Amino acid sequence: MKPKIYIIFLAVFSVIALSAGALSTDASEEFLEKRAVLVVREIGHQLLQKSGDFTSRVLPVKKSDKNTFLLEFQSRFAFVPDTLVKIVHERLSAANLPLDYMVNVYKCVSPEVVFGYEIRSKQPDILACMGRTQAEDCYKIEIQFTGNYRAAKPMNLWWAVGFILAGGTLFSLFNKKFFKKKNDAEPAVAVLEDIQFINIGKYAFYPERALLKQGEEQVELSDKEAKLLNIFATNQNQVIERDRLLKEVWEDEGVFVVGRSLDVFVSKLRKKLQGDEAIKITSIHGKGYKLEVVA
């Protein structure tokens, strides 16, 4: 798969995965909320049964906010605080709901807390008035999760896949070596296949890449070396005047300043072309240079 296509694939699939994760997370949160309602209602049923009431009804659970559930009952009943603490903890644990929560018991006609306690998973619990039976009355019980009960679930699989793919996409975009083979020290040959080149003897000259290639050997050229060789390569076996070379390669610099530079760069090109004895850059006295290629 080509690098650009691979990156596009990663990006698109990351968006799909993260979107699916968001939708799946919403569905999971709704499921956990419904589970919490069922568990709280079951707590009410068990509490009534422990008080000896097997016929009265537990009223529908109400929510005052996303973490607080209110239990109300059809009939009056008495309860032992120890029993309430045990039932609540056992039911929440069995349902895999958070074990950081607060329970408050109110009389139906009064906002005053009759009995209350707090359970913390990593700190000492706060319990009061244990062992004292609460007389029969009309009660309502509030169970509040002190942490978001949605946080109890593990990371959604789609979210995990989405984050991994998104990370891979960013890595692909910003790491230039991502698509290179481990043992490739030079530009991959496949990259050059579609680029125009000029034959100079045994060499393939790639002007756009400032690169000479002979078999597996690749020789990099400087910007000015590439410009100079391009003039020679497109005019093989022809004399090129010094003035033309100076103008086209150093058109923004003074001739008197760079005149000697031309000789230096010609010398560098000779060294880089020495792998083919049929290639010569000959100095033509008083005129310029000629790239000779013996067929």
Image (spheres, rainbow, N blue to C red):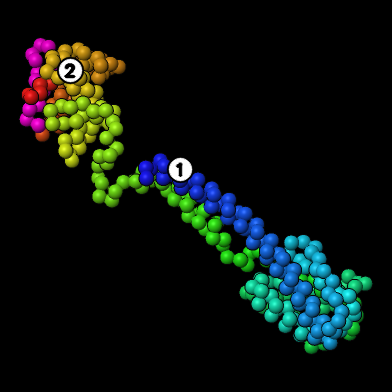
In percent of the image, x 61 and y 54: which residue is there?
Answer: 22
Considering only vertical position in the picture, is 80 above or below 214? below
Q: Position of residue 238 (x, y in %)?
A: 13, 15
Amino acid carrying label 2: it is Asn
Q: In the picture provided, is 216 more to the left or to the right than 24?
A: left
Residue 94 in percent (x, y) is at 65, 77
Q: Is residue 280 visible?
A: no
* Main secondary structure along the magenta-highlighted residues: strand
The total number of labels drawn is 2
| Quadrant occupied by the C terminus | top left
Up the image or down, 260 lies above or below 39; here it is above
Residue 54 lies within the magenta run = no
- Tell me the residue at 79%/64% (across/down): 63
Amino acid on which disc 1 is placed: Ile
Observer-nearest residue: 211 or 160?
160
Horizontal and vertical percent position of residue 67: 73, 64
The picture places residue 211, in percent across and down from the top left corner, at: 23, 32
Q: Which residue is mark 1?
A: 8
Q: Quadrant of the N terminus?
A: top left
Q: Earlier in the sequence, mark 2 or mark 1?
A: 1
Q: Which residues are magenta?
A: 276-290
Q: Cα distance, mark 2 to mark 1?
A: 43 Å
Q: Quadrant of residue 229?
A: top left
Q: Residues within 10 Å of mark 1 (few under 14, many from 20)?
A: few
Residue 283 part of the magenta segment:
yes
Furthest toward the right, the residue is 109
At horizontal 25% and vertical 16% (from top left) the residue drawn is: 248
**Secondary structure of residue under mark 2:** loop
Name the mark on residue 235: 2
